[in-house]
Amino acid sequence: MRLVITGAGGQVGGQLAGSLAALGDVIALDRRQCDFSRPEQLPSVIRELRPDVIVNAAAYTAVDEAEREEALAATVNGTAVGVIAEEARRADALLVHYSTDYVFDGHKGAPYTEADPPCPINAYGRSKLAGEAAIGEVGGRYLVLRTSWVYDARGRNFLRTVLRLLRERNELRIVADQIGAPTWAADIAQATAALIELAAQECTDGEFASGLFHLTASGATSWHGFAVAILEGATRPALLAAGRAPCLVPIASEDYPRPAARPKNSRLAGDRLHQRFGIALPCWKEGLSLCLEEMARRGTA
Ligand SMILES: NC(=O)c1ccc[n+]([C@@H]2O[C@H](COP(=O)([O-])OP(=O)(O)OC[C@H]3O[C@@H](n4cnc5c(N)ncnc54)[C@H](OP(=O)(O)O)[C@@H]3O)[C@@H](O)[C@H]2O)c1
């Protein structure tokens, strides 16, 4: 199998190269080799590689910046994704694509299912929804996986920001009224590898059906709860030893205004994925603890 990863320099993309290696030949493309802001250049890049599987982890993910760069976000997350879907269909390849909890407005009082109507409240969410729609319009063989609150030992994410701020400040004010599932990029990549294997078997058996699935860690917490778990799991012993006991103050979203609105409820139900493929990610606390262990081993926690 020839597997092409786009967005290989990102959190999920970076983990995919290792996770997919056992499935076949992996070609990992970063932004320089495959630039989604220039969709017209994508067909020649993809055609030359003749992929059996394309895993698209490239995305414009700067949620606040997207408010003033909506056209660029729409090109990268919408138009270019449609082009990649066309190329996947042309090559008769399976396309695996990631989307987001931010396609929802967060007003539902329970976890969102794939059947709930999306209603994004920010430019990033609109651009990601456009990507989902483009894939659906093109058709072909695809799996769209919506995930949430992604973090990793590297990259720009909440975990690394909190670890840095805990070293610098005695008090952090963290939003406590947005709820979701922090999801480790390594868990997403591992599940993706398992899904590709299962989908390939379904294709061989003539049973494959394209679809949209929710793929997040199990359980849920707030950003404040996530920060408390980071403090407990990583830094408290070292900080206490240094005579410091930083305080994490829960605040409301309204007390931390940002350019982009965020959904209050980001919980995604994973039942559809579990029923079809038997896959469910571990609890978010487990993923966090393993990621922190890895960071400690590398000396980056
Ligand atoms: N991060 C989250 O909290 C989150 C939540 C829900 C869903 N998701 C989705 O999960 C997927 C993976 O996200 P992630 O967390 O791995 O994001 P990430 O760490 O920000 O990685 C995104 C990658 O896309 C690349 N990229 C940005 N603009 C590009 C362009 N014009 N052309 C080609 N590549 C470009 C980035 O390149 P550079 O490295 O050069 O910047 C980066 O390597 C995305 O579809 C995202 O929408 C993420």
Image (spheres, rainbow, N blue to C red):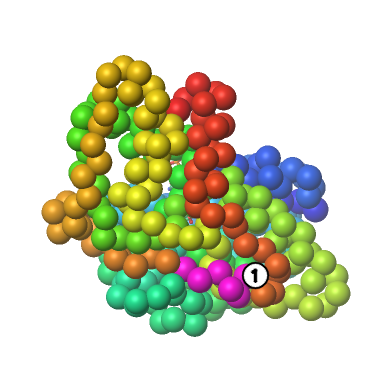
**Nearer-the-camera pick, 24 or 172:** 172
**Nearer-the-camera pick, 177 or 38:** 177
237 above or below 27?
above
Q: Residue at x 55, y 76 (%)?
A: 136
* Residue 103, x across and y down, in percent: 39, 69
22 above or below 216?
above
Q: Is residue 270 magenta?
A: yes
* Residue 35, x across and y down, in percent: 49, 47
Q: Is residue 268 left or right of residue 191?
A: left
Quadrant of res 155: top left
**Nearer-the-camera pick, 257 or 175:** 175
Q: Is residue 82 visible?
A: no
Q: Kindly identify which residue carries mark 1.
A: 274
Residue lying farthest to the right in this orientation:
205
Q: Is residue 27 left or right of residue 166?
A: right
Residue lying farthest to the top in this orientation:
242
Q: Residue at x 62, y 62 (%)?
A: 280
Q: Residue at x 34, y 43 (%)?
A: 227
Q: Residue at x 74, y 43 (%)?
A: 21
273 above or below 75?
below
Q: Is residue 16 magenta?
A: no
Q: Secondary structure at mark 1?
A: helix
Q: Amino acid at mark 1?
A: His
* Residue 186, x across and y down, in percent: 59, 45
Read off the magenta span.
Answer: 268-273
Q: Is residue 150 left or right of residue 256?
A: right
Work out which quarter of the rendered image holds the C terminus and state it. Answer: top left
